[in-house]
Amino acid sequence: MHLVCIGEPSDRCSQEDGDSCGSSATGSPELDRNPSPPPEEDETEAGEEADAIGETVYSKHWLFSTLTRLIQMVTDQESGPSDSSMELTDDLEEDLCKVWDMAMDKDVAVFLQEFKAPDILLGVIAKSRSPRLTEICVGILGNMACFHDTCVFLSQNSDLGAVLLLLLGDNDPPTLLETCRLLLTCLSQPDVAPLWLERIRQQPAACGSLCFIMSSSTNVDLLVKVGELVDKLFDEDEEIMKSWVSAPPSESDPHKDKQQDIASSLLEAATQLRSESPEALEVYLHSLQLLTTVEEGMQALVSDGACGRAVWTFVCKIVCEDFCQADDPPLILQEQKALLAPALALLSALHSSLQMDISAELLGSLIRILQFNAEYHQSRTAGNSESEERQNEEEKQVEDVQLKALVETTAEFLSVSLMELTKDLLSLVVKEGHLTERSCVSAVGTLVPQHITAVQHLVGLLSEVEPKLADIIKKDFSISSNASS
């Protein structure tokens, strides 16, 4: 069956009976006009308008028919053997996919709500033995939830909430993807987010289900969406984050025997995504960084047997090998700031707790970020008129919140690293080309005056390793050396 749109030609003939206005009164000026449309055309158009869903061209009758066929299919197969699979015919699947697409229209979403479609779809999900059917039903609800009023309506259905959280334990990736998308959509609506957060707090198995997906799935789209969901939960509710890093596996969790802790699961998924979808790393790096903001999270990372050192190694690799390379243009910071900011904040926190050694490559990356930031701002102001500079300043206030956070984090981390710097390590940094006059001047320009002590220590070591560079820094920034080798 194909989607029926209002406005298609009618099969009914409209030329019966002729004009009802009476054309016998010839010569009358009042009748010297085009004849009125035959009554049947009026009725047809009125019927089409009545059948249209809101302002769309979609047919109510077609939608009723499709949902009725869905109910009938589930009813028929429910009466069959309990172990039989649920066969979704090609025609019904095609029409349900059309409903899925149609639900992205607000008028259709409202009509589906009024028609009690959420209850129908929920009933189908509960009885479904077809992964594809479950995926489509959840997808339709997910599209409906894109609109505020229908999202509020759906969220008030406690049965739907319970079923969705149980679906996180499903083993079908497309169903899991649509389930996570629907949950994330609801959590993004401020009016109903608290309701969903409370449901998730009351469902301990949700953590285990998401950890199992992150630690075992190779489906990139699913890993991306799960990462977004976990990041949203951690960002919105610190108590959920604390409970998830410290709670033992739930007895109701079907994956409890295989479950990794939340930090290890985040690391496993991030490792998978590094090569498959580097841009998707942002939510995982941010989630891991959020763990470092609470004591429970830090303990989950740095306690004996925890994955903190593995996280350090992984994040160092992506910072030093994947991001902000020497042959990149300074503009790259704008593209990578959302990834670099949580990555460096995470490394800074782990370094403080684990006392990890700073490599020459990591020092080089920190210096390069500050250099690129300085050169990026210089390029934006070079040759600009006064009005353009004023406009740039206004844009910076709006756009560069993330960049400012990245620079502040980098400067803080670099200053700590410089205080631990040895002459041997500095010699290696210079030898490998990580510290040149250009990069050093840019970095020091960012560090002073707030981190003057670290700069003095650097200048003291430079006086022994690279005296000419030390003199340049002393002169340009009026700094006296204050360090010992």
Image: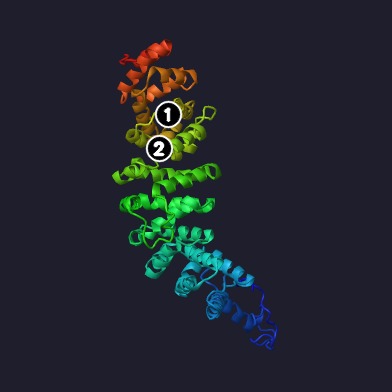
Residue 6 to residue 315: above or below: below
Q: Which mark is residue 309?
A: 2
**Vertical arrangement, residue 430 with respect to residue 213, above or below:** above
Answer whether residue 402 is visible to the viewer in this image. no
Q: The disc labelled 2 sits on which kind of residue? A: Arg
In which quadrant of the rendered image does the C terminus lie? top left
State the separation of the CA atoms marked 2 and 1: 20 Å
Tell me the number on the disc at residue 366: 1
Q: Residue at x 34, y 20 (%)?
A: 455
Q: Position of residue 236 (x, y in %)?
A: 35, 52
Q: Is residue 34 above or below residue 274?
A: below
Q: Nearer the viewer, mark 2 or mark 1?
A: 2
Left or right: 49, with 180 as reference point: right
Around disc 1, counting alpha carbons within 10 Å, would you say few (fewer than 14), some (14 to 19), or many (20 or more)? many
Amino acid at dot 1: Leu
x%, y% of residue 373? Answer: 44, 29
Between 29 and 83, the one lying in front of the other is: 83
From the top left corner, tell me how far across and down residue 237 is, in percent. 33, 53
Query: Quadrant of residue 58 in the image?
Result: bottom right
Q: Is residue 28 visible?
A: yes
Rendered-image quadrant of the N terminus: bottom right
The 10 Å Cα crowd at callout 2, few under 14, some 14 to 19, many 20 or more, is some
Position of residue 390 relative to residue 307, above or below, is above
Q: Point out the tag, 2 or 1, that comes first from the N-terminus.
A: 2
Q: Quadrant of residue 454?
A: top left
Q: Name the side, left or right, on which 62 lies relative to 471.
A: right
